[in-house]
Amino acid sequence: PHPPNTQGPQILARRHSSQIFVAGSLPFLNPATAASSPHLCCHPFPPPYPQPRRSSAPSRTMAPMATTASSLLKSSFAGARLPAAPRSPSSVAVATPRICASISSSSSPSNPPYDITSFKFSPIKESIVSREMTRRYMTDMITYADTDVVIVGAGSAGLSCAYELSKDPSISIAIVEQSVSPGGGAWLGGQLFSAMVVRKPAHLFLDELDIAYDEAEDYVVIKHAALFTSTVMSRLLARPNVKLFNAVAVEDLIVKQGRVGGVVTNWALVSMNHDTQSCMDPNVMEAKVVVSSCGHDGPFGATGVKRLQDIGMIDAVPGMKALDMNTAEDEIVRLTREVVPGMIVTGMEVAEIDGAPRMGPTFGAMMISGQKAAHLALKALGRPNAVDGTLQNVSPALREEFVLASKDDEVVEA
């Protein structure tokens, strides 16, 4: 290990080891060598600086993407750290506002596999580009017109749900997102800040995704929220049984004999301009299960439960209560459920239907609520799942911690 730098600021210990590749990005620099790196930008606080405690986790790279049904057993939700990286209590780093460091790779640039001084693209006809895009998109529309699961909303809960479901390649998953850019509010932390705070034990999901974080006793901090969102999205969309339909809005639900059986869709720009044109009819996607993760109230928020109230399938949508972070995260996970036959509600939309407190800028409940919604969907499809214990390696204690969460009277002091 590198000796402590007694002449300058210390580096806040990060969980990642010597090299971790996240979604094909460049490797992070080993923090053990950071003190001697010329690429440090430190907060201008005077010494003395606290001595960081460094992670003892062994070096590892990102686990290969799961592609078989048996990979459902390999999940942080089922109580497994992926990949295994034992961590002793002494490796916990104490987060402190006094220190801030950014680390950049010092490796020299290499020659690209082509001559950039006389570069020329291969020729192509413009019509070929048009045909390639159109053929693939229309094929996807035909393929997913009747699918296993439709997830409405690609925020942190919806993406986590889709990621967990996609581990079974026999399940087809369509994600419908009204925005051009999926991710919802998970590209930033609170008040447009960069860092993402995740309370334990939701950090096990980050371990599964091999996402680096700074670790404190009860929570972890990802240096930029976009690191989580881009990683889970790239891992998810690389799988062959998933299609993201972004810039597409869900205008209504398909309901037959009291059961939700799909969604009514349209281009998002068309949905926002029904008052300017007439006869812009929608399209449909049938599904065995619909997961609504439309977020909290707003122009496109909580639209799933609002529509259920409009058509008389639920009585009321009372909306969120005032912020209480400790109560809210437990409640969001605990109340994630199938609210009517065929439709599961997850994420902050749960707070709208149940009057739970708003959660604020902490994201662990979004991830675990999404995972729970995935296992509820597996249960509805008759597949092994962690909700009813049909996954063989589910720890009862961990299942209670992840799936049932805590009740209001069990909230710890903030």
Image: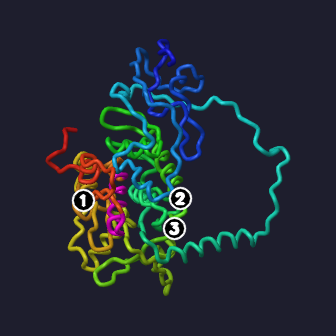
Residue 276 x, y percent position in the rendering: 49, 80
Q: Residue at x 62, y 71 (%)?
A: 136
Seen as rendered, the residue at the extreme bottom is: 279
Quadrant including the C terminus: top left
Instruction: Give the alpha-carbon distance from disc 3 to disc 1, as whole Å.
Output: 27 Å
**Residue 381, picture quadrant:** bottom left
Q: Position of residue 305 (x, y in %)?
A: 30, 70
Tag 1 residue: 335
Residue 97, label in figure: none
Which residue position holds label 2?
237
Q: Residues within 10 Å of mark 2 (few under 14, many from 20)?
A: some
Residue 55 as seen in the image, left or right of residue 18: left
Q: Residue at x 51, y 72 (%)?
A: 269
Which amino acid lies under the numbered mark 2 shown in the image of this protein? Leu
Cα–Cα gap, marks 3 and 2: 11 Å
In this view, the residue in front, 298 or 307, is 307
Question: Where residue 245 is drawn, which disc sits there?
Answer: 3
Magenta region includes residue 130: no
Which residues make up the magenta segment? 367-383
Residue farthest front in this picture: 392
Q: Secondary structure at mark 1?
A: helix
Tell me the element at label 3. strand
Residue 296 seen in the figure:
no
Q: Main secondary structure of the magenta part?
A: helix
Query: Which residue sits furthest right?
Result: 118
State the SS at label 2. helix
x then y, percent, for residue 155: 42, 57
| Amino acid of disc 3 | Phe
Give the CA separation, mark 2 to mark 1. Answer: 28 Å
Indicate left or right for 403 with 71 as reference: left
